[in-house]
Image: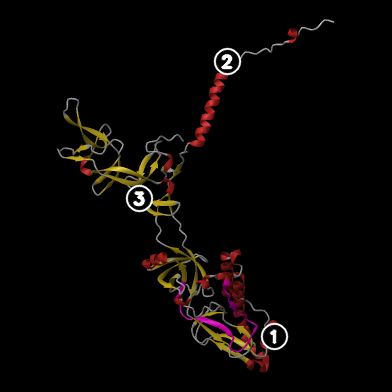
């Protein structure tokens, strides 16, 4: 059998020639261009515009203060069941009936048995109840659920006040037991309050840091139809319309407020405002306190010890811009008498000394932008001028050599499609925004567009957005 020739089994692979056509070339160019664009997009800083609007800055001037009033606590002379006849928060005159103490309990039984029958409420009475209910609804917050109990006691006191008029008229039906009822009349004129909390004798000087921890606050509510012992506290009177709210601040803020003398205060509960006279104190542990004294509104907050307020300090309003837009730029300082108008468009500029090819001295008009004018000095753009340039005063032989520079605070305006520096005057500033003066000669106007981040652009850069 004949052997196979190994050379006959060798197979050569056919190599297909690379066929490059115009379509592949175009595709390759487009692909490379896309890669370059994507790389540039993620590596370059993007210029973002910001529309200038009018506004004001809100600062955190909200405090929880402690209300201090002239309060006198009154105590029961006998034991028994107490019933109130004046609504909490109501002003009573000297010797007005405030409460009774029933030593036998018959009066309490009389109330509970509904022996009084039906009592129709007048329109005035209904209006009083509706006002109290709507005030609670408008200010209720789930975070302060304890206020529900204050509301409950307030409404209960209002109803008792209306019902007890009839009760007193029928007290004789109790027979001999009525002689065991002790009547508590007001010892002076004041606002009736049915709670005690241990702050009645407090002064700004005796307050401590712990007193401002509202979570540890404990108020004892005095309720009708409860059994009281002799010498138990039964009510108190706020005897003076002058009162004070004390807040915690740092020493610097305390000095700032003291310089104001009077500060406008907004009560967050009802959004009412009042002017408070400022005084400062220091606690034994070194904490700075500010007292705000008022001669009104005491009745509104007579049952509250902790009051949330907002200090309305001087509000600077103007054009609101982000701090990231603000930049500082250097300019040449040129006396105003060396600045003139000329050229084709009658623009601002200066006459600079120059020399012709034959050595003859001459002048040329250099157009430049004026960015500010202050005390007879113009701030001119430094792109066309140099330190040492000699300027000629118009219609004179006097000259001035450029040597001084100054800086201005401003932003880059992009209304015309390129970055144009505009000076700003900052009125007020916080961590994020600044309020700048509007309607200045060389500044911004409302609805102008500026660069959001000044670090992403140079002056005269074109904006392609």
- For the residues labelled 3 and 2, the Cα–Cα distance comes to 63 Å
Q: In the image, is residue 156 part of the stretch drawn in magenta?
A: no
Provide the secondary structure element on which disc 1 rests.
helix
Above-or-below relation of 166 to 65? below
Residue 109: which disc? Answer: 1
Could you tell me residue 239's position as x and y percent?
A: 48, 81
* Total numbered labels placed on residues in the image: 3
Q: Toward the viewer: 202 or 224?
A: 202
In front: mark 3 or mark 2?
2
Corner quadrant of residue 359: top left
Above-or-below relation of 212 to 70? above
Q: In the image, is residue 220 part of the stretch drawn in magenta?
A: yes
- For the residues labelled 1 and 3, the Cα–Cα distance comes to 75 Å
- For the residues labelled 1 and 2, the Cα–Cα distance comes to 110 Å
Corner quadrant of residue 35: top right
Q: Is residue 241 left or right of residue 156?
A: left
Residue of label 3: 425
Q: Is residue 258 left or right of residue 348?
A: right
Could you tell me residue 62's position as x and y percent?
A: 48, 63
Q: Toward the viewer: 132 or 120?
A: 132
Provide the secondary structure element on which disc 2 rests.
loop
Provide the secondary structure element on which disc 3 rests.
loop
Above-or-below relation of 368 to 299? above
In front: mark 1 or mark 2?
2
Is any atom of residue 450 visible in this view?
A: no
Contact between labelled residues 2 and 3, with CB atoms less than 8 Å apart: no
Mark sitting earlier along the chain (3/2):
2
Residue 21: which disc? Answer: 2
Contact between labelled residues 3 and 1, with CB atoms less than 8 Å apart: no
Q: Toward the viewer: 384 or 174?
A: 384
Mark sitting earlier along the chain (1/2):
2
Give the residues in magenta.
Answer: 216-245
């Amino acid at each position: 059998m004949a052997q196979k020739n190994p050379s006959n089994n060798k197979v050569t692979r056919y190599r297909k020639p690379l066929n490059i056509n115009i379509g592949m070339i175009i595709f390759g160019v487009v692909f490379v261009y896309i890669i370059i664009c994507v790389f540039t997009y993620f590596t370059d800083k993007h210029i973002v515009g910001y529309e200038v609007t009018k506004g004001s800055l809100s600062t955190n001037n909200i405090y929880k203060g402690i209300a201090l009033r002239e309060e006198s606590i009154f105590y029961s002379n006998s034991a028994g069941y107490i019933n109130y006849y004046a609504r909490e928060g109501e002003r009573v005159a000297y010797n007005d009936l405030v409460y009774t103490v029933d030593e036998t309990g018959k009066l309490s039984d009389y109330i509970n048995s509904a022996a009084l029958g039906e009592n129709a409420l007048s329109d005035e009475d209904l209006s009083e109840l509706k006002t109290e209910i709507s005030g609670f609804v408008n200010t209720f917050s789930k975070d302060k659920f304890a206020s529900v109990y204050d509301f409950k006691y307030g409404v209960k006191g209002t109803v008792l006040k209306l019902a007890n008029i009839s009760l007193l008229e029928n007290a004789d039906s109790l027979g001999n037991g009525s002689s065991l009822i002790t009547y508590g009349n007001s010892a002076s004129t004041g606002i009736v309050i049915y709670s005690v909390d241990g702050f009645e004798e407090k002064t700004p000087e005796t307050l401590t840091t712990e007193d401002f921890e509202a979570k540890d606050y404990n108020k004892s509510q005095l309720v009708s139809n409860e059994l009281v012992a002799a010498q138990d506290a039964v009510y108190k009177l706020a005897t003076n319309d002058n009162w004070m709210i004390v807040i915690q601040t740092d020493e610097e803020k305390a000095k700032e407020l003291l310089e104001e003398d009077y500060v406008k205060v907004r009560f967050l509960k009802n959004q009412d405002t009042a002017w408070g006279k400022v005084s400062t104190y220091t606690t034994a542990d070194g904490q700075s306190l500010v007292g705000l004294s008022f001669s009104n509104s005491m009745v509104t907050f007579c049952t509250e010890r902790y009051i949330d307020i907002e200090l309305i300090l001087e509000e600077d309003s103007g054009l609101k811009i982000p701090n990231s837009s603000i930049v500082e730029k250097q300019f040449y300082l040129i006396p105003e008498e060396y600045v003139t108008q000329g050229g084709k468009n009658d623009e601002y500029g200066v006459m600079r000394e120059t020399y012709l090819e034959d050595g003859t001295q001459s002048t040329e008009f250099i157009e430049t932008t004026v960015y500010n004018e202050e005390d007879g000095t113009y701030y001119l753009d430094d792109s066309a001028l140099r330190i040492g340039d000699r300027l000629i005063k118009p219609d004179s032989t006097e000259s001035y050599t450029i040597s001084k520079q100054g800086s201005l605070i401003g932003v880059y305006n992009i209304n015309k499609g390129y970055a144009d520096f505009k000076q700003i005057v900052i009125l007020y500033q916080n961590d994020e925004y600044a309020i700048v003066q509007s309607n200045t000669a060389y500044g911004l106007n409302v609805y102008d567009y500026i660069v959001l981040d000044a670090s992403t652009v140079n002056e005269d850069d074109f904006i392609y957005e």
